[in-house]
Amino acid sequence: MCKGSLLTDTCLVTSPISRVKPRVAAIAYHQPPSAFDRWRYPGYDELASADRDRRTAERALHAQRRVAGDLETCLMRVGWSIVEAPFRGATAMAYEGLFTLGSGYLHVRGSLEEHLSDAPQNVEYTRRPADVSSERFPQAKSKWGTYVAGVFGDHPLLGREMVNLPFLLGLVPVVDGEKLDVERGVIEEYRRELLLDSATLRRALRWRTHAGTVVHVTFEHFVSGTRPQLCLQRMTLRAERDTRVIVHAGLDADVRTNG
């Protein structure tokens, strides 16, 4: 269902499941976006009763905004992308899930390539069979996740569980002897964006080291749809003056499945 001009208004793509109360399947934004268009991504697929009346849809979306929170950090925008800006440690784990990429065979959570210094991935704790909707997990800032369809392991209490495989996106630049750290370092600009048209996760930041070197860093990666076992990754560094750079890369197998 499209309302108004494709250049100025919003198009609600609905499912034919119900002709009386169509379900909102997606939101397409067109230039320029209105205040109605700038609502947060979480919860949009729950608008099952939005009808053809724009005011009714707006009231339903307003209720969803209370769940979404900060309108500026995650939104569907012109160009079909989801944006995180700036970085916030309190929401890092949520964005990792939101930025997960997969091919149907290989799936990788959208964790930071350089990781967070105070978020160990080898924490172990006991999980017991329970109602998953009421289960409480230990607080964590970040959770690596690499999963392959069909790779399971036996859990002593939960039966067969999908195994969390080694983290494969680790890529850590060290400039002037300082490791990139988005929480402890001086990050002057930060933007992470999931490009929905190409299924590419891109992060660009401007980092000023304690030695005063300004470095522009860009991370990109995607999971191939035509070669489902393949994940491609690229990092670009550009310093505004001559400097010494070391890059650490590799697989990290010190992870836990139920941690």
Image (cartoon, rainbow, N blue to C red):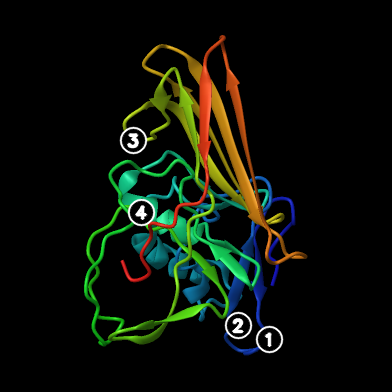
Q: Which residue is mark 1?
A: 16
Among the two numbered marks 2 and 4 on one chain, the one whose residue lies closer to the N terminus: 2
Q: Which residue is mark 4?
A: 142
Quadrant into which the C terminus falls? bottom left
Total number of numbered discs in the rendering: 4
Q: Please rate how many residues cluster around mark 4, counting C-alpha atoms within 10 Å: few if below 14, some from 14 to 19, many from 20.
A: many
Q: Residue at x 46, y 27 (%)?
A: 174
- The amino acid beneath tag 4 is Ser
Residue 113 x/y as whole percent? 49, 44
- The amino acid beneath tag 3 is Glu
Q: Is residue 228 visible?
A: yes
Q: Which residue is mark 2?
A: 22
Q: Which residue lies most toward the right here?
A: 226
Confirm or deny contact between disc 2 and disc 4 (CB under 8 A): no
Q: Which residue is mark 3?
A: 183
- The amino acid beneath tag 2 is Pro
